[in-house]
Amino acid sequence: MTFWYQIVVATPAHSAVAGPLTYKSGQALAPGALVRVPLGKREVLGVVWGSLQGSGDLPESQARAIAGVLEGLPPLPATWRQLIGFTASYYQRSLGEVALAALPPQLRDLSSEQLARRLKRPVADTSYTPDAAANALSAVTLSTEQAAALAEFAADTRPALLFGATGSGKTEVYLRAAAQVLESDPQAQVLVMVPEINLTPQLQQRFETRFAHLGRERVVALHSGLTPAQRLKSWLSAHTGHARLVLGTRMAVLAPLPRLRLIVVDEEHDPSYKQQEGARYSARDLAVYRAKLETEDAGVPCRVLLGSATPSLESWQATLTGRYQRLTLNDRIDGAPTLVASRTALPPEGAARLWPGKAGSTAHADGIPSSTLVPSPDALPVKGGLPVVRRVDMNHQPKHCTVAPPLLDAITQRVARGEQSLIFLNRRGYAPVLACHDCGWKSECPHCSAFRVFHKIDRTLRCHHCGYTERVPRACPGCGNIDIAPVGRGTERLEEHLAELLAGVERPGGGPVRIARIDADSTRLKGALESQLASVHAGEVEVLVGTQMIAKGHDFRHITLVAAINPDGALFSSDFRAPERLFSLLMQAGGRAGRDARHSAASEMWVQTFHPTHPLFECLKKHDYPAFAAQQLEERQAAGMSPFGFSALIRAEAKSQDVAQGFLNAAAAAASAQQITAHDQVSAYPAVPMTIQRVANIERAQMLVESASRKALQHFLAAWQPLLFETRAQPEHKSLIRWAIDVDPIAI
Ligand code: ADP
Ligand code: ZN
Ligand code: ZN
């Protein structure tokens, strides 16, 4: 007896063989079974997608036989296959690419025997005890708000968005929601997603400890930082149902979980949930879709719980229309409600703020000239324990100063009190440009349309786009002038500058102020980040300088001041999401301050800006995300942008802009010539160069396609794909290097 199957194998995204291939077998196989099949001269891993009555379009004699079956492994669940199918079609990639990329790489190399051995490896199981379970549930007493959020969550079925500041107790809510699911069904599985696993070792520990009673190795991690063997092990554990809780990054959303009942997406607004190559999927959006699939399949709810202090505007809007449920935590745990003193009622540093009633009598007592800080309405109530935000108007500061005198004062006072400050500048290196003032030479990268950054530590000019690195020239390459100078500041220079500014200051125990820098350069070596963080935690550092790397996730207990040196760039960016990202970054950075209740009354967030009255900073000052969101949503609605409109970017790369843009415009012309379905609801704009138009000598262009209807856009893209392939195959576009579609792009 011969059986016929459609098998999905890894096909290059842009090849003619996009769908499943037909194979035969003497053995009956279930959909979702993993097999090895011959492909050309190789043997590759494949997934049984479906069965056929006969050999289909392929003459029977040409069909090849399945070479082997990975025995012992349960078939991949139907919901997994549906999810993969959806991902491939929504993000316009081939099924084979998406399916095989979602499997652990090591699976491709294992023989059936090797696999069988892995599956048999015993896991000593400490048995489940109801006592321990009860412990897990009563580990801490929930705050009223947390209890209310959980009760509301349990009473609903919609996707939920948990909105609460850093430190408001969101993670505790995730833990409880997970515990409820895991205790109520002894086989249920929970998926918890985080943006970057390396930044959250504490989180993993918290989940492991809380669920230790479920037995050994029931909590597993799944992310790209694992070795191939660890990754396979976690994946097998998830797929076989042994793992009860999977903690992972975006890739984990595509893990097979046969009894998934809850998906938590922490920091749901984080851009790293969007995959930036291959199938450019949004793991957050897929989580919501997957929960729906799993619910339909199981007949019992699989819930999704998104959480953030600064939700994506897409999720926020969904709570406004009622598509998502909104749960709110207003107060920081332990944070005693404080009053923000307005500029005219500033209490002396670190003193009177605990007694807001006295504040009025001490105007300007902290020595900040009145022109420096921006007036704001009197005594705004601030949510418990959040830092006071101070905007420094840089128009009234000494010219070219990097650290305004009042900020320097505030840092100095922190040093004297034995507290830490975190100074934040989103630019690494010493200076973004090196320039000659005589002839105007600048440190452009010869291969990119960008400047190379001056790194003083090893005296190099480095391109942050293509990596091209050279020693700093002794003299100007343009005119021979030996006086070439850095322009602007990066973290390296800021660190040096702060050391000079604080040179005369002594720390309480004696000795100079210790400054540390954390950015992609200082943490390049393995373990460097961990050891630097450890020294911050140990109090061996007074001032910490860094990029956005330090703004996220870390739980610094002794930081009472966070300052953003130069955040203005994002206010006027051509990318419509730049303000959203800046706001969220500043809120997160501010969340680093005063996590320790002892300090929270005195913690401050400083923002140096030339636009102090910008609405973004007004909202930041009030810690008012809803106001910020309302204002952004209004702008986006007027412009028909996400979440009120849907878009895709088609990117093309070639040796010249002409070729790259020519391809895009020709493909658009082909679409309008063919009057693709629903084309009237979709607009394709002319191709334009990308913001950084040349990287590593490759010219990059993009075309924006928009529609007010997600469905119309999807129809259009699906119909357009074959035309893009056809256009690509035409001789005049032969020199095109590559093209790709990005659906729901997060940066434009
Ligand atoms: P978030 O995830 O919103 O930043 P966490 O859940 O991490 O907040 O809570 C912040 C801190 O407060 C943590 O140290 C946590 O252990 C503690 N915490 C959370 N909920 C409670 C509670 N109900 N009682 C006591 N401490 C709590
Ligand atoms: Zn010169
Ligand atoms: Zn370059």
Image (cartoon, grey):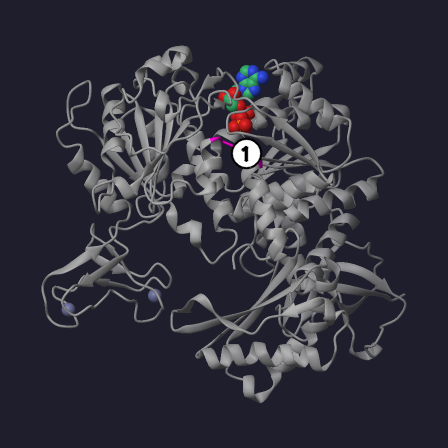
In this image, 420 relative to 579: left or right? left
Residue at 29% across, 43% down:
395
In the displayed structure, 120 sits above or below 145; it is: below
Q: Quadrant of residue 482?
A: bottom left
Q: How many marks?
A: 1
Residue at 20% across, 62% down:
435
Q: Quadrant of residue 621?
A: top left
Residue, far bottom: 731
Magenta stretch, overall SS: loop
Queried on whether the Cβ of the residue with tag 1 lies below 8 angstroms from ligand 1, the answer reads yes
Query: Which residues make up the magenta segment?
Result: 622-626
Q: Is residue 35 visible?
A: no
Picture coordinates of residue 403 (x, y %)?
A: 25, 39
SS label for mark 1: loop
In the displayed structure, 216 sits above or below 32; it is: above
Is residue 623 shown in magenta? yes
Looking at numbered disc 1 in the image, what kind of residue is underneath it?
Ala
Indicate which quadrant contains ligand 2. Answer: bottom left
Q: Is residue 478 visible?
A: yes
Residue at 43% across, 23% down:
378
Picture coordinates of residue 59 (x, y %)?
A: 83, 79
| Label 1: how many Cα within 10 Å (few below 14, some 14–19, many 20+) | many
In this image, 615 relative to 326: left or right? left
Q: Quadrant of the N terminus?
A: bottom right
Circle 1 residue: 309
**Between 619 and 264, the one nearer to me in the picture:** 619
In this image, 434 relative to 181: left or right? left
Residue at 17% across, 35% down:
501
